[in-house]
Image (cartoon, helix red, strand yellow):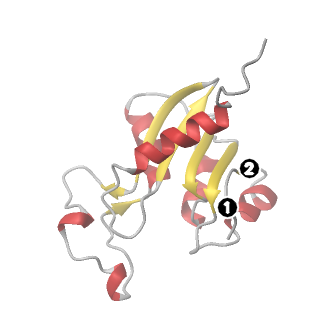
């Protein structure tokens, strides 16, 4: 017997990504990422600075002033992959659950890390063709879980 009120795994991991995003230290965008494999969370990440570096929330936001983001800022996807690597957890075959579709660099990083599927809720305005790039160029499975551009 199935319970129709039970969250699907995609819904479950996406809701967790929303909570992960609440840890973001970026003033501009709160990205949350969950890497999952075999129905289990293997890593999470949010956009913020590398360990020991100043956080954007503690500094002036350059993006709000029309300049590029600070070099210290890491995207949630890279933080999730780095966290998995730090703990010795393979990301090969994983799914990435992202609030925003990844930027070009993160698309390539996810592919290089062996991630095979990306589920996102909203298209990242800085790379509107990201979902198409993931699917057509990198050959990854892509699912728009929420709203479109």
Residue at mark 1: 147
Distance (Cα) linking label 1 and label 2: 11 Å
Q: Position of residue 8 (x, y in %)?
A: 68, 31
Frontmost residue, 31 versus 70 = 31
- At a point 24% along the width and 49% down the height, the residue shown is 51
- At a point 71% along the width and 61% down the height, the residue shown is 131
Q: Nearer the viewer, mark 1 or mark 2?
A: 1
Residue 19 in the image: above or below residue 9: below
Secondary element type, mark 1: loop
Q: Is residue 5 visible?
A: yes
Can you tell which mark lies on residue 143? 2
Q: Quarter of the image containing the N terminus?
A: top right
Q: Position of residue 112 (x, y in %)?
A: 61, 48
Q: Is residue 94 left or right of residue 54?
A: right
Frontmost residue, 49 versus 64 = 64
Frontmost residue, 112 versus 68 = 68
Q: Quadrant of residue 59?
A: bottom left
Q: Quarter of the image containing the C terminus?
A: bottom right
Residue 91 in the image: above or below residue 72: above
């Amino acid at each position: 017997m199935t319970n129709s009120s039970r969250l699907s795994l995609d819904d479950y991991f996406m809701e967790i990504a929303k909570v992960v995003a609440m840890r973001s230290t970026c003033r501009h965008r709160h990205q949350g990422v969950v890497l999952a494999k075999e129905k289990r969370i293997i890593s999470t990440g949010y956009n913020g600075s590398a360990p020991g570096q100043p956080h954007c929330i503690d500094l002036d936001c350059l993006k709000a002033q029309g300049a590029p983001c600070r070099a210290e800022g890491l995207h949630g996807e890279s933080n999730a992959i780095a966290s998995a690597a730090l703990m010795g957890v393979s990301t090969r075959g994983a799914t990435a659950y992202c609030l925003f579709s990844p930027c070009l660099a993160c698309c390539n990083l996810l592919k290089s890390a062996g991630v095979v599927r990306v589920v996102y809720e909203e298209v990242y305005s800085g790379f509107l063709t990201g979902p198409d790039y993931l699917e057509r160029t990198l050959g990854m499975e892509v699912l728009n879980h929420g709203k479109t551009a």
